[in-house]
Image: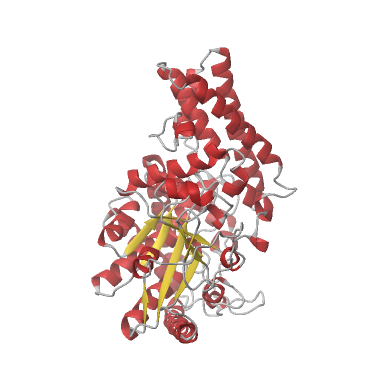
């Protein structure tokens, strides 16, 4: 008998970063690292589970900006160069560490890992990571959901309803374009909800979304079953709330599994440790040291002293942690089952980047968890839609406005360090609405091109990533520059319309560089 249902949900997202004018651009490596450390390791393990006949069900967002980058031939060409450079570095490391009992096995481990990554990318994935997601999506073992078009922070954008509607509409279009079907679920950007958002989601065919726990426990009325059963919103979307206990066990570096002293230390990397002249060809061309992915030390303890990493011992620890996680979920289900009139569920949402990037062993842990479930059969992994199909009748709750950010509300994305952004975003949305109405019936293809690029620039400026990175003081200069760049581009394009003088050289350049959503039309802004 199944005691409970586990609903694991991953959020796979990166902001759209593309700089074709540069051979090597630091922030493009965010994507290359995520493919190498997160997406391919996960897909490789899902393929192994599939080959071994192990049942698994996983839900993951693939956000529209991420999907657009993964399908971009320019960026994937650069990714191939990235892999080849790392394989070259691996071969050099194998030679450099020859005879070293601690580091020689690790150099071989990483060199082989990059080779296997390239083989999987060019082989099973046929040079497109999206093919892996589509493979399991079509088999029914993976539920792929969408997000906002550019991960815009919807509550703050909602002063212009067209801004929110367009974020959702283009997200649905993008999902259908890349995956061949419309999404049933959405990971709201930053899990941020506000009153009335469910009406728009319902109109766009979205059946469910993910929120943090306090959205339901502080809902109106409060959720009777807490976060252990979904609730319906007034406009018939299902809200799934995050379970804090299972989340903390996995994401917390202090109290959770990732802090185990046998796991790989994230911060020690040969990009910073080795002689500059040796490592120079493999770091940023301007000489800025960066992570290479060759990390030879384990966490060891809370001191700066770090011992050599042993990936085989770490791999064994993931099995023990999967057993422990399974045991905790079984006990949790025993307790919840005694209090509820249905089989309970536990929703465990995480950033996909946790699994592989921050916690190198995370994908192996996840695979081992599915093996534990398949072995014991006392719980079952399901997708949100599967649970809704089992329990179609649910309490109606108006979720409390909230997010999953620090302090649980909007502070991270609206504070004295980034509040300057929003007067520009709101004005741009109002101007685009006005110009869209004015030129809605135009037959001038060039005017349409300019207005459509204005929409792209607005969408890219709306990305919540820029405000977030300003708050965390991570890539602050780049985030500020990107925001200002899109505002400036929008205003230059607006000038072309107002002055009836199109700069085709600049328009071509912007369409190539900021090429996200080549299928959109400016009219979507008021028809969505």
- Residue 179 vertical position relative to residue 508 in the rendered view, above or below: below
Q: How is the image coloured?
A: secondary structure
Question: In this orientation, which residue lies closer to the viewer: 293 or 242?
Answer: 242
Quadrant of the frame with the N terminus: bottom left
Rendered residue at 57%/22% (across/down): 494
Q: Position of residue 273 (x, y in %)?
A: 59, 63
Q: Quadrant of the C terminus?
A: top left
Question: Does residue 127 appear anywhere in the picture?
Answer: yes
Residue 493, above or below 301: above
Q: Quadrant of residue 87?
A: bottom left
Residue 18 visible, this orientation: no
For the residue pair 389 and 424, the one nearer the viewer reads as 389
Residue at x 53%, y 52% (from the top left corner): 189
Point 26% across, 56% down: residue = 123
Residue 354 image point, x, y percent = 51, 65
* Percent of width and height locating residue 438: 51, 20
Residue at x 30% of width, y 72% of height: 49
């Amino acid at each position: 008998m199944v005691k409970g249902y586990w609903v694991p949900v991953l959020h796979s997202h990166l902001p759209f970063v593309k700089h074709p004018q540069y051979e090597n651009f630091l922030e493009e490596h965010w994507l290359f690292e995520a493919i190498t450390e997160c997406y391919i390791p996960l897909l490789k393990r899902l393929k192994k589970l599939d080959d071994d006949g192990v049942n698994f069900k996983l839900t993951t967002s693939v956000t529209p900006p991420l999907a657009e980058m993964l399908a971009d031939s320019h960026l994937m060409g650069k990714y191939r160069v990235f892999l080849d450079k790392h394989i070259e570095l691996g071969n050099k490391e194998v030679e450099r560490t020859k005879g070293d009992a601690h580091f020689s096995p690790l150099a071989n481990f990483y060199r082989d890992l990059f080779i296997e990554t390239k083989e999987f990318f060019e082989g099973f994935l046929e040079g497109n990571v999206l093919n892996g997601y589509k493979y399991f999506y079509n088999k029914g073992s993976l539920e792929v959901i969408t997000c906002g078009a550019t991960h815009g922070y919807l509550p703050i954008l909602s002063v212009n309803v067209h801004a929110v509607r367009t974020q959702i509409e283009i997200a649905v279009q993008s999902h259908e374009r890349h995956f061949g079907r419309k999404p049933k679920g959405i990971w709201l950007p930053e899990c941020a909800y506000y009153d009335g958002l469910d009406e728009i989601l319902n109109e766009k065919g979205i059946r469910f979304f993910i929120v943090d726990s306090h959205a339901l426990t502080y809902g109106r009325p409060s959720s009777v079953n807490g976060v252990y059963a979904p609730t319906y919103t007034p406009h018939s979307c299902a809200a799934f709330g995050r379970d804090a206990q299972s989340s903390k066990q996995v994401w917390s570096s202090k109290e959770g599994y990732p802090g185990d002293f046998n796991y790989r230390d994230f911060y020690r990397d040969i990009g910073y440790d080795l002689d500059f002249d040796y490592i120079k060809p493999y770091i940023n061309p301007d000489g800025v040291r960066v992570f290479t992915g060759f990390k030879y030390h384990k966490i060891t303890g809370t001191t700066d002293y770090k011992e050599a990493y042993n990936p085989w011992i770490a791999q064994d620890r993931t099995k023990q942690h999967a057993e422990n996680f399974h045991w905790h979920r079984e006990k949790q289900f025993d307790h919840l089952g005694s209090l509820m009139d249905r089989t309970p569920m536990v929703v465990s949402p995480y950033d996909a980047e946790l699994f592989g990037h921050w916690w190198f062993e995370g994908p192996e842990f996840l695979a081992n968890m599915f093996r534990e479930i398949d072995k014991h059969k006392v719980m079952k992994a399901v997708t949100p839609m599967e649970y809704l199909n089992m329990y179609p009748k649910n309490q109606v709750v108006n979720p409390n406005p909230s997010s999953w950010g620090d302090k649980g509300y909007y502070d991270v994305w609206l504070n004295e360090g980034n509040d300057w952004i929003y007067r520009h975003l709101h004005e741009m949305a109002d101007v685009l609405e006005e110009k869209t109405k004015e030129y809605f019936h135009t037959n001038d293809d060039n005017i349409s091109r300019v207005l459509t690029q204005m929409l792209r620039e607005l969408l890219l400026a709306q990305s919540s990533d820029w405000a977030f990175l300003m708050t965390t003081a991570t890539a602050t200069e780049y985030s500020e520059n990107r925001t200002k760049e899109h505002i400036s581009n929008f205003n230059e394009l607006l000038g072309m319309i107002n002055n009836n003088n199109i700069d085709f050289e600049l328009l071509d350049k912007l369409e190539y560089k900021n090429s996200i959503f080549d299928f959109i039309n400016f009219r979507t802004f008021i028809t969505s």
